Amino acid sequence: PLLAAGTCNAAQSAGVTVDSAGGAFTSPDTKVGVTIPAGALSAPTSISMTESGNETVVGTSRVVFRTEFGPDGLFFTLPVTLRFKWDDANGDGLIDGIQGSLFELRETNLRVWRNGVPLTGSCGSPTHQQPACATACGGVACCCDMVANTWTLSVFGFSEYVVGDSEAMLLPGGRRAA
């Protein structure tokens, strides 16, 4: 794994070798995916994703995904698609598995960071909805779909990507405020 010893979530880590023909792969739980188009690489390259685990607290934020894509610093000649998918089975706009804790995470507040630097605004922003999202991140796509429960990003390089809430809500008694 690319992350420090003991922090790899095997259910969300994977690797493949991709050549100039391109390829796609997902984490074993299918929540994180990578699609590399034909021509993005000139030679066979070992590609990996290592997920540190879900639903952790960083400062005042709740992190849903913290994934290291490697090799770190790899750049592509064409944009590569990263996809992060969370659960919201009842469609209430709250990320499943977090309700009942002191923090609830609203999908409208989800953002993406690359190496600790904000890459996107919030998921609920019109900038990150179709059709505006097609060029929302420096001319390439960064789209949040609150029906499909996904962030989909076009990127030219690998590094650490984090999906989380910049304003996690501390709620008295662990219940959603009315």
Image: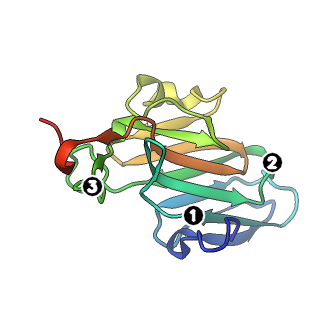
- Residue behind mark 2: 75
- The amino acid marked with disc number 1 is Glu
Q: Residue at x 80, y 52 (%)?
A: 74
Quarter of image, res 56: bottom left
Q: Nearer the viewer, mark 2 or mark 1?
A: 1
Crowdedness of circle 3 by 10 Å Cα count: few (<14), some, many (20+)? Answer: few
Front in this rendered view, residue 134 or 93: 93
- The amino acid marked with disc number 2 is Phe
Q: Can residue 175 be seen in this view?
A: no
**Left or right, residue 150 beside residue 24:** left
Residue 51 shows which numbered tag?
A: 1
**Label 2 residue SS:** strand
Tell me residue 42's x, y (percent): 87, 56
Q: Mark 2 and 1 residues: CB-CB less than 8 Å, in contact?
A: no
Tell me residue 8's x, y (percent): 59, 70
- The amino acid marked with disc number 3 is Ser
Q: Mark 2 and 3 residues: CB-CB less than 8 Å, in contact?
A: no
- Residue behind mark 3: 101
Instruction: Say which label, 2 or 1, has the lower sequence index.
Output: 1
Color scheme of the displayed model: rainbow
Disc 2 to disc 1, C-alpha distance: 20 Å
Q: Which residue is drawn at 77% across and 55% down?
A: 72
